[in-house]
Image (cartoon, rainbow, N blue to C red):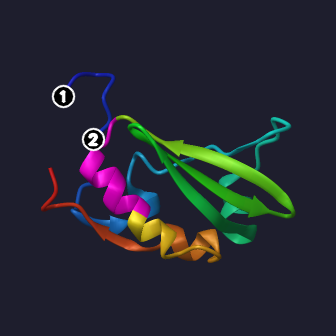
Amino acid sequence: MDEGSLPLQPKTAMARLRDFPWWPSAWVSETGSSPTTEEISKYGILKNVRRMGNELTLILECNGVIFTATIGAQLSVDLLILLRHILLQQWGESMESVENIDFDISNLR
């Protein structure tokens, strides 16, 4: 692995989504405002997950404002498709519960 690439998984294969290095740590609104990760966890509601090419865009509402974040190109297309499927099942749920989903990618490549 070169210096610029991220590991695809934490030290153990089964982990909460938020423990993976590719899970978003920055969210941005159309106006450029950016809440803290604590605000996102506490007040954010998952509204949609869109796939475009090798990226997923997560869309959530937090205190009446829409924010987006991207999970990107470091993941395989198969993993992005699986992740989108799992996340869409959480539509309308709090980001705290979404981030705490146990996710095992040990059998994926």
Q: Amino acid at mark 1?
A: Met
Label located before the other in sequence (2 or 1):
1
Towards the viewer: 13 or 63:
63
What's the residue at 16%, 61% (across, down)?
106
Q: Is residue 11 left or right of residue 63?
A: left
Disc number for residue 7: 2
* Above or below, comparing residue 69 to residue 13 in the picture: above
* Above or below, comparing residue 87 to residue 25 in the picture: below
**How far across and down, in percent of the image, does residue 86 sit?**
40, 69
Q: Residues within 10 Å of mark 2 (few under 14, many from 20)?
A: some
Q: CB of mark 2 within 8 Å of CB of mark 1?
A: yes
Q: Is residue 9 visible?
A: no
| Residue most extreme to the top | 3
**How far across and down, in percent of the image, does residue 14 sit?**
26, 68
Q: Quadrant of residue 66?
A: bottom right
Magenta residues span 74-84
Q: Is residue 48 left or right of residue 36?
A: left
Q: Is residue 78 visible?
A: yes
Reading the image, the residue beneath label 1 is 1
Q: Amino acid at mark 2?
A: Pro
**How far across and down, in percent of the image, does residue 3 sit?**
28, 22
Q: Residues within 10 Å of mark 1 (few under 14, many from 20)?
A: few
What's the residue at 40%, 66% (across, down)?
85
